[in-house]
Image (cartoon, rainbow, N blue to C red):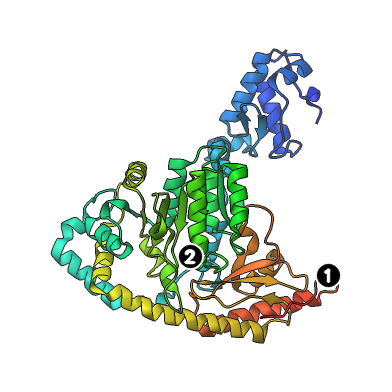
Amino acid sequence: MDFSTLALDRTTGDALYQQLAASLAGVISTGDLAAGARLPSERELAFSLGVSRTTTVNAYRELEARGLVRGFVGRGTFVCADPAPATAVTRGAPFAWRGKVALRAQDAADISLRRLIHTAIDPAVISFSAGSAALDCFPLDAFKAMTDRVLAREARTALGLGPVDGQPRLRRAIASRSGVDPERVLILSGAQQGLDLIARCLIDAGDVVVIDRPGYLGASQSFRGAGARLVGWDVKRGDLSELDDLLLRYRPKLLYTCPTFQNPTGVTLDERTRRGLLELAARHRIPVVEDDPYRELGFAGPAPRTLAALDAGDLVIHIGTFAKTLAGGLRLGWLAAAPAIVDHLAQIKGTTDVATNGLTQLVVAEMLISGVYDEHLAALRAEHALRQESMLHAIVRDTPPGAITTRRVKGGLYLWCRLGLGLESRELLRGAVAAGVTFAAGQHFYADSAGGDEVRLCFSNVPPPLIADGVRRIGAVMRRTLASPSRTVDADPIPLP
């Protein structure tokens, strides 16, 4: 727009900066200056209007105080919100908070994970989106009995504030299962907190993090929120030469991977690849974050040894959780690493989360020590395997031939699927949501623009009859989409292996 046309009247006695601010607010409200539009510099606008630079500086400050614009050093001043009507200020109009949000928080504002969880808890929707264990397998009676026992025996410890690094009994139980010393274990309010702590501790703005491609959305969000630049390593191929090249080219601050029943692909790195990855990390002196929520959910035999177990140089921060084996609502996870970094992470944790839930920690410790947890795992694995087979059969039976390609996994919670016949994941998701079923579109799992023809289906948290119903609905949406006369198909059918 032509800013020289902004109305200023020197005869009214009103301060020029207030008039200028009001004029700019007016063109923002009409849409002539849309959100994201860049304003002229203070000097440029002052010259254009024939006023002092002090006038334009004060006008911009007034607009920023009202939450309408934001100024960024070295970038300029940008429109960031629509103004409330002038009369609404005295009627309790909402404060323009969006204009006050810090730049880093705006850059990290990705609600994809939040949306996945929201759809997963809607009882009216069949959700193949957010990853969750079969909650109908949760050992509820044992959990209740152990909760009563803990409260009767040590209510003060269970309900009081505990140490920031976690209840000693749970740390010892986890350390025993992991083959490490308890001082190497830090209890978390869920594994996502561990990723956030690591990002806050190790990442500076502009640092590079090498991550799985495709990989876990929550990890990408945490690292991006700390200002990192993400570079993907093709985890499906597991090519160590490619990884070596990435480490050499980008000199990353951190390497993140989910090596066992990976989210979203279900891929498991073999021990040779794990050893090679650790050798590269040691050579390039790069710490490794091993996100390992699924390793106890294998359907046929034990998974390969963890990166942490193979690590001879204290490079690995290993993250585990009870969200995928017991229940996400417990909000209980842990990390294990060298004592020095555990201590540093605990200090950061203490600034926002004084202690995790003491009662839950002690009850879960009882489950680990008593053997109830391992009995539950055995039943859970069997049920998850059954549900995977139900989903695979439903895909073959109820979706158009060539519309979706996937493969059986050996553990975890997900099927990673490729769409054929020209189908696109977000278009398919819109139709599926309208039909009362959700899944995760492939774009969520890439740091770049890939994934448009991929989807992730979680088979574990839906009983087999609902799995069949949900896949049938998706198949119906596929058929309607493919039958649309406006569609052009430029992809050959891909059979389900």
* Residue 360 visible in rendering: no
The residue beneath circle 2 is: 271
Question: Which one is closest to the eye, mark 2 or mark 1?
Answer: 2
Which mark is on residue 490? Answer: 1
Which quadrant does the C terminus fall into?
A: bottom right
Q: Residue at x 58, y 32 (%)?
A: 66
Secondary structure beneath dot 1 equals loop
Q: Residue at x 31, y 73 (%)?
A: 373
Which residue type carries mark 1? Asp
Residue sitting nearer the eye, 367 or 407: 407
Residue sitting nearer the eye, 56 or 120: 120
Q: For mark 2, does the 10 Å Cα neighbourhood hold few (<14), some (14 to 19), or many (20 or more) residues?
A: some
Q: Position of residue 109 (x, y in %)?
A: 56, 47
Q: Is residue 147 above or below residue 95?
A: below
Which mark is on residue 155? Answer: none
Q: Residue at x 42, y 49 (%)?
A: 315
Q: Residue at x 74, y 77 (%)?
A: 494
Left/right of residue 250 with respect to residue 27 in the rendered view: left
Q: Position of residue 2 (x, y in %)?
A: 81, 27
N-terminal label among 2 and 1: 2
- Label 2 – label 1 distance at C-alpha: 40 Å
Which residue type carries mark 2? Glu
Q: Quadrant of residue 17?
A: top right
Farthest-out residue, left: 153
